[in-house]
Amino acid sequence: MSFVIVLFPEPRDVFIDDRPQGSSKAASGRPRALYVNAGSHVFRLGGRGDVQPPTQTLDVPERPILNPFRVEFRKC
């Protein structure tokens, strides 16, 4: 199992493979660590009434080197 952090300027709901994971940020405002199995996953941000929510399909490594695996979304 690996852990990832989802980066986005504001808190958003995170879905991994269409399963809700909660907010991308902790109450402190820092990114939350989310645990996932290694392999290909679809990451999606939700909330804010997005017509076309941002998604990314990425391969999460079995053991990220030192830091958590980062999934970064850019604000449009």
Image (cartoon, grey):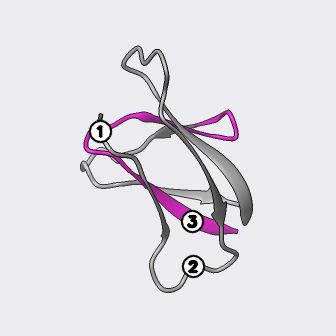
Identified by mark 3, the residue type is Phe
Q: Distance between the residues labelled 2 and 1?
A: 25 Å
Mark 1, mark 3: which one is toward the viewer? 1
Q: Which of marks 2 and 1 is nearer the N terminus?
A: 2
Residue at the spot 70% in from the left edge and 75% down from the top edge:
62
Instruction: State the SS at label 3.
Output: strand
Q: How far apart are marks 1 and 3 (CA)?
A: 23 Å
Percent of width and height locating residue 73 = 39, 47
Mark 1 burial class by Cα count in 10 Å: few <14, some 14-19, many 20+: few
Q: Earlier in the sequence, mark 1 or mark 3?
A: 3
Query: For the N terminus, which image quadrant?
Result: bottom right
Q: Indicate left or right for 14 with 28 as reference.
A: right
Instruction: State the SS at label 1.
Output: loop
Q: Does the magenta stretch include residue 5?
A: yes
| Picture quadrant of residue 2 | bottom right
Q: Residue 49 carries which label?
A: none
Front one among 71 and 3: 71
